[in-house]
């Protein structure tokens, strides 16, 4: 798994590449915690290059969502491949996340007021 | 048919002079439910124990994703074990531990995940088996069916590709047993898990199986879809389906075996 990080007009963007599993999800968690510790208001995670995510990856996103909500931050996940999206659906968690089909619509979600 | 995930080849095992598995050949298709059926002493539990690496055969091989687990070094076997979960017959929960601790156990043992992440994973798994809110209960405070569901949540804690079930309906009333069957179906379909179920309950087998394997006297008697098994012309299979005590399967050992047994002890 690789994580590429960049900024785009106040949005912290993480692009994850590869599989998210028990072995490497702690690394992803550490990276997200850095942003959370800085109380980043707008975090976007691009998942277009993630082919597989296990329960620990899912839990990592759930925790990040809990933590960002606590300081009124916003977290958006974009471009989920069908296999990854179904993991969210099976766990009945697709409803609590802001999911966007494209980077553009994800950015719009974060930039729209409220 | 789907590609195979487990291949059993010419597997044989004796306990003393009793041949329990006699050259078993078997292919388990990926993402499907295979039910291994047979009477008591037919070898099905022994076969299951071989597939999870708890018993070594006298001859033959068991390939899980093309890796022969019979000849695998113990440390490598641990990696293979992470690919599968097992639902034990008696649920095998730790009575002194809460539901949460029981489900969290494999995550604590096999991963370096933090407590916060483990807590979330356990909640998701409990929701999958319909037990949200039961985290703090102790096993003895739950019904047999609920304990089985906790055991199932534990079996899928590490996102296994394969789940082995040893008599999942044993000791449960028919309605609860059928609920467990439904759960096995749900989990297999939703999570695309390969399921290998050992049972002697015909109704359950016909309800959930994509493939049924009939074992008798340590041999594979017949393999097929439930409808093939139902219409099988094999007298042993028919006797088993109908649950008749008279038929191709002898009710008693032969007189010779009886006398031989008496004189040799």
Image (spheres, helix red, strand yellow):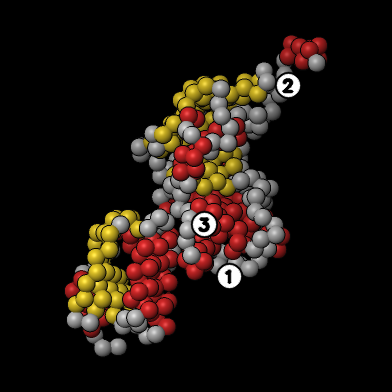
Where is residue B102? Give x, y as percent: 60, 58
Residue corresponding to mark 2: B252
Dividing the picture into quadrants, the one containing residue B235 is top right
Is label 1 or label 3 in front?
A: 3
Q: Residue at x 25, y 72 (%)?
A: A13
Seen from the viewer's position, the closer of residues B36 and A10 is A10
- Number of other residues with Cα within 10 Å of mark 2, as a class: few under 14, some 14 to 19, many 20 or more: few
**Does residue A97 show up?**
no
Image quadrant containing the N terminus of chain B: top left
Q: Position of residue B201 (x, y in %)?
A: 61, 40
The relative height of residue B101 versus residue B228 in the rendered view (above or below) is: below
Give the structural element (helix, strand or loop) at label 1: loop
Judging by the rendered image, the residue that carries numbered circle 1 is B133
Task: Tell me how far mark 3 sits from mark 2, CA to CA.
Answer: 48 Å
Q: Which type of secondary structure does the marked residue at label 2 adopt? A: loop
Classify B171 as above or below B222. below
Q: Which mark is residue B107?
A: 3
- The image quarter in which residue A86 lies: bottom left
Chain identifier of the residue bearing label 2 in the image: B
| Residue drawn at point x = 30 percent, y = 88 percent | A114
Circles 3 and 2 on the same chain: yes
Estimate the spatial distance between the alpha carbons at disc 1 and disc 3, rounded to whole Å. 19 Å
Where does the image place residue A92, in percent across and percent down from the top left?
42, 67
Which one is closest to the eye, mark 3 or mark 2? 3
Circle 1 chain: B
Q: Is residue B68 left or right of residue B175?
A: left
């Amino acid at each position: 798994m690789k994580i590429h990080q960049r900024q785009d007009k106040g949005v912290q963007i993480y692009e994850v590449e590869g599989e998210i599993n028990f072995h490497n999800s702690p690394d992803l968690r550490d990276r997200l915690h850095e942003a959370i510790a800085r109380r980043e208001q707008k975090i976007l995670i691009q998942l277009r290059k993630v082919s597989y995510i296990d329960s620990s990856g899912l839990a990592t996103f759930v925790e990040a969502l809990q933590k960002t909500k606590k300081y009124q931050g916003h977290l958006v996940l974009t471009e989920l491949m069908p296999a990854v999206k179904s993991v969210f659906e099976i766990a009945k968690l697709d409803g609590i996340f802001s999911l966007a089909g494209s980077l553009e619509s994800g950015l719009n979600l974060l930039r729209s007021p409220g | 048919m789907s590609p195979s995930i487990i291949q059993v080849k010419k597997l044989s095992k004796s306990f003393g002079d009793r041949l329990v598995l006699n050259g078993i050949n078997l292919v388990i298709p990926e993402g499907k439910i295979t039910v291994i059926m047979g009477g008591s002493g037919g070898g099905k539990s022994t076969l299951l124990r071989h597939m999870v690496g708890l018993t070594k055969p006298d001859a033959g091989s068991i390939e899980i994703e093309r890796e022969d687990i019979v000849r695998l070094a113990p440390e490598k076997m641990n990696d293979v074990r992470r690919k599968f979960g097992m639902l034990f017959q008696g649920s095998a929960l730790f009575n002194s531990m809460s539901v949460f601790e029981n489900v969290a156990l494999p995550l604590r043992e096999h991963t370096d995940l933090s407590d916060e992440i483990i807590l979330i994973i356990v909640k998701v798994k409990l929701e999958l088996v319909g037990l949200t809110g039961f985290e703090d209960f102790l096993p003895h405070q739950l019904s047999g069916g609920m304990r089985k569901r906790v055991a199932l949540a534990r079996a899928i804690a590490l996102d296994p590709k394969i789940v082995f079930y040893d008599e999942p309906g044993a000791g449960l009333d028919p309605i609860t047993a059928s609920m467990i069957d439904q759960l096995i179906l749900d989990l297999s379909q939703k999570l695309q898990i390969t399921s290998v179920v050992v049972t002697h309950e015909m109704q359950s087998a016909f309800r959930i199986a994509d493939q049924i394997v009939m074992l008798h006297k340590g041999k594979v008697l017949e393999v097929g879809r439930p409808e093939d098994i139902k219409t099988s012309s094999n007298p042993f299979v028919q006797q088993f389906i109908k649950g008749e005590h008279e038929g191709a399967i002898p009710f008693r050992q032969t007189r010779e075996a009886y006398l031989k047994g008496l004189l040799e002890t």
